[in-house]
Image (cartoon, grey):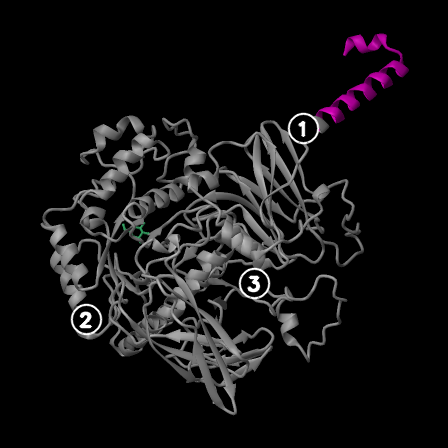
């Protein structure tokens, strides 16, 4: 400072000004010029700085489903490009996106307690969910959509910090009103924020923006960028029972027989850690005492129409025969004393997935449940772990679940055989991978909120049933589970069976049968997930008529008359306990202790799923359904294709009769999907959507279905129509 004394005050001012100019220039230099290019119809990408090669989309192996995006047509860039900014400072990327007064935000991964994300501060971090929506979750997809009808995705495999409408920029053009806490009653500790800002801990990132005009359109475009949602095999949509962890071959055969004798449907059985000779860490070898002849068991079960799914985590025991061979391709920290294979390296993949294939996929095992690839920190590798590929511990944490899904799916794809399994971690880019997320958390209400949020995160979630304190809880959990992507009891610890509570065993059987009867509907809805990107299980907020997404943007603002349209008010509320299941169904689960609840019916008439009676018309209804029923409503003109209840899902080539159930008054149409149900031949065009049409004329139903297309698989037998609404 001494030399400053030689300057006159004027010179000091000049020096100070120069310093400031230099700083401003430096910050400007850090500012990135974002150039937006339309990479697919309605999807734009810009690159800030130097993005890392190891990103989410590449790691997931995502290939956009171009035909589906073309079919969606054109739309305009949904935001002001000038209001999206990026800077690279200190080796990190600072991103900012605009937000207006009216917007609500959804997404940022698989949250369990909240649907509205505006006002949240999150660190998107793959983790075991620990009871707080702070970004640490099984699938923290860096993707959000706005009620204004657009979406944003950051293609980066890092722990991204998000301030979703909490930060107030000094230079904002729409700053919050300044208030005096001394006197202003509505002074807020959280002033209005007009931006979503993110800190990406990497020297660059790819940014994707998805156009609307509706929020659903933006979600669809995101899923289609991922390759379209997964299409499970038909059997995946039947019923699955995961057995007690130390069960043996005799136990498996006895379980399948018990299901059959008692008349409960069963498509696949899950074996938990005890199928392996050692677990935690794992050998990936059959335990000879419990499973002397695994091939015979798997094949015998297959003949009975029951498949086997195997639990595993990826942590390799010193007693596994692949231990020595894979050692050079593993991380420098262990998990439960097991090696962590660096599956981002082809060398490790060859050994590791080769092991999952040998004597497992090879002998007819139908899929895997890939456990504990999410966290938590107290057992997983620390953030200082290193991996031989050079990918950081953070990158590995963000992508391990994605990679497990991708490479196991490839084993099956190579055999032209579909799989459907479970995984405890995923991330952006993985919508096409046929896995359902689950966890050890067991709050029924939060399980439903997760199901709602799964539709914003490009993943599937099962509110699995494990054990229950009472028959009522058992039945309530089971009811919502059969209206989910995987109908499953996970009895790994409890050994529970569907008939564990005799007082509700009949109701449980009816529900399991209903799941099977609805297979043509579930399967068609998953086909729409694949070909059109429409999530099969999703929030009410994506439903036209629920939050005004179908109202043209330039429509004059109307004064809401709450008496005439109470739904308008309701849509402002966060809806965490009812959801859409496929095109036509609204599901409103009941929770233990509840005898009555309210259900928000979007605009239009809605009908009771079971009786066909009118339930309400764009209004909030209060229902008391009794213990036996989960409230489910069908849209006006809604069509639900059903099949007879079967103990196992139809095999490729089987013909199945369809009963078309039709609700309400409006003319209805439905696209019924058909293919062989088991292979990937649909990727080469071996599928069809057949058009069902129903009209009600003078109280009579007139229904039709378009002809089967020559040369395409045709599993549809006799088609009958049932008018549910008299
Ligand atoms: C847990 C998993 C359970 C069960 C168990 C077996 O991590 O979430 O569903 O598979 O491991 O040890």
289 sits to left or right of 264 = left
Alpha carbon of mark 2 to alpha carbon of mark 1: how far?
67 Å
Q: Badges 2 and 3: C-beta atoms under 8 Å apart?
A: no
Q: Secondary structure at mark 2?
A: helix
Residue 18 colored in magenta in the image: yes
The response on whether ligand 1 sits within 8 Å of label 3 is: no
Q: Is residue 324 visible?
A: yes
Alpha carbon of mark 2 to alpha carbon of mark 3: how far?
40 Å
Alpha carbon of mark 1 to alpha carbon of mark 3: how far?
38 Å
Q: Is residue 446 visible?
A: no
Instruction: Give the number of the disc on residue 649.
Output: none
Judge whether 705 appears above or below 347 on screen.
below
Q: Residue at x 24, y 43 (%)?
A: 356
297 sits to left or right of 551 = left
Please state which of residues 89 and 494 is positioned toward the viewer in this rendering: 89
Magenta range is: 1-27
Residue corresponding to mark 1: 30
Q: Position of residue 360 (x, y in %)?
A: 20, 47
Please state which of residues 701 and 141 is positioned toward the viewer in this rendering: 701
250 sits to left or right of 724 = left
Q: Secondary structure at mark 3?
A: helix
Residue corresponding to mark 3: 542
Residue corresponding to mark 2: 260
Please state which of residues 594 and 15 is positioned toward the viewer in this rendering: 15
Mark 1 vs 3, N-terminal side: 1
Judge whether 625 appears above or below 494 on screen.
below
């Amino acid at each position: 400072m001494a030399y400053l004394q030689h300057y006159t005050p004027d010179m000091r001012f000049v020096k100070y000004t120069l310093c400031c100019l230099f700083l401003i220039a430096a910050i400007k230099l850090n500012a990135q010029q974002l150039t937006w290019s339309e990479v697919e119809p309605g999807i734009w990408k810009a690159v800030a700085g130097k993005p890392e090669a190891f990103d989410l989309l590449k790691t997931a192996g995502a290939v956009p489903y171009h035909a589906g995006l073309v079919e969606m047509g054109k739309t305009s860039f949904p935001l002001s490009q000038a209001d999206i900014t990026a800077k690279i400072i200190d080796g990190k990327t600072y991103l900012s996106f605009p937000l207006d007064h009216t917007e609500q935000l959804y997404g940022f991964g698989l949250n369990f307690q909240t649907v509205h994300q505006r006002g949240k501060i999150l660190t998107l971090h793959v983790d075991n969910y620990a009871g707080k929506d702070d970004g640490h979750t099984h699938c923290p997809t860096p993707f959000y959509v706005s009620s204004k009808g657009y979406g944003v995705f950051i293609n980066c495999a890092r722990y991204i910090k998000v301030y979703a409408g909490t930060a107030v920029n000094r230079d904002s053009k729409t700053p919050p009103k300044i208030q005096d806490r001394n006197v202003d009653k509505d002074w807020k500790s959280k002033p209005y924020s007009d931006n979503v800002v993110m800190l990406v801990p990497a020297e660059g990132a790819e940014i994707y923006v998805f156009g609307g005009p509706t929020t659903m359109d933006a979600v669809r475009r995101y899923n289609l960028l991922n390759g379209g949602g997964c299409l499970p095999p038909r059997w995946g949509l039947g019923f699955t029972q995961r057995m007690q962890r130390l069960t043996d071959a005799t136990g498996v055969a006895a379980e399948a027989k018990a299901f059959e004798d008692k008349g409960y449907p069963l498509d696949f059985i899950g074996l938990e850690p005890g199928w392996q000779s050692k677990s935690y860490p794992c050998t990936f070898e059959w335990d000879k005492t419990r499973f002397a002849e695994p091939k015979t068991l798997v094949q015998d079960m297959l003949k009975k129409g029951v498949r086997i799914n195997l639990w595993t985590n990826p942590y390799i025991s010193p007693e596994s025969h692949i231990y020595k061979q894979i050692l050079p391709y593993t991380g420098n920290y262990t998990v439960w004393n097991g090696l962590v294979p660096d599956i981002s390296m082809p060398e490790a993949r060859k050994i590791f997935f080769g092991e999952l294939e040998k004597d497992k996929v090879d002998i007819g095992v139908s899929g895997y449940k890939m456990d504990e690839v999410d966290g938590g920190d107290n057992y997983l590798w620390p953030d200082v772990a290193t991996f031989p590929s050079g990918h950081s511990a953070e990158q590995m944490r963000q992508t391990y679940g994605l990679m497990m899904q991708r490479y196991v799916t490839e084993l099956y794809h190579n055999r032209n055989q579909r799989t459907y399994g479970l995984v405890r971690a995923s991330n952006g880019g993985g919508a096409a991978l046929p896995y359902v997320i689950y966890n050890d958390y067991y709050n029924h209400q939060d399980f439903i909120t997760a199901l709602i949020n799964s539709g914003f995160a490009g993943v599937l979630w099962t509110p699995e049933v494990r054990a229950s304190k009472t028959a009522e809880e058992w039945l309530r959990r089971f009811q919502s589970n059969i209206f989910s992507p995987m109908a499953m009891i996970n009895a790994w610890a409890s050994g529970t069976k569907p008939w564990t509570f005799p007082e509700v065993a009949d109701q449980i059987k009816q529900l399991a049968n209903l799941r099977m009867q609805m297979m043509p509907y579930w399967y068609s809805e998953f086909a729409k997930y694949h070909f059109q990107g429409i999530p099969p299980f999703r929030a009410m907020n994506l439903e036209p008529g629920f939050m005004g997404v179908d109202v043209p943007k330039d429509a004059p603002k109307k004064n809401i008359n709450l008496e005439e349209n109470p739904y308008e008010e309701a849509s402002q509320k966060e809806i965490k306990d009812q959801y859409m299941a496929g095109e036509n169904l609204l599901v409103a689960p009941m929770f233990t202790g509840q005898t009555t609840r309210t259900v928000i019916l979007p605009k239009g008439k809605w009908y009771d799923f079971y009786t066909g009676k009118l339930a309400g018309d764009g209004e909030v209804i209060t229902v008391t359904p009794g213990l036996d029923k989960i409230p489910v409503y069908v849209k006006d003109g809604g069509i639900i294709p059903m099949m007879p209840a079967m103990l196992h899902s139809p095999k490729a080539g089987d013909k199945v009769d369809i009963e078309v159930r039709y609700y309400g008054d409006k003319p209805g149409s439905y696209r019924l999907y058909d293919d062989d149900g088991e292979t990937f031949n649909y990727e080469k065009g071996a599928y069809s959507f057949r058009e069902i049409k129903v009209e009600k004329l003078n109280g009579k139903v007139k229904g039709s279905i378009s002809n089967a297309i020559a040369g395409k698989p045709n599993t549809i037998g006799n088609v009958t129509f049932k008018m549910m609404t008299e």
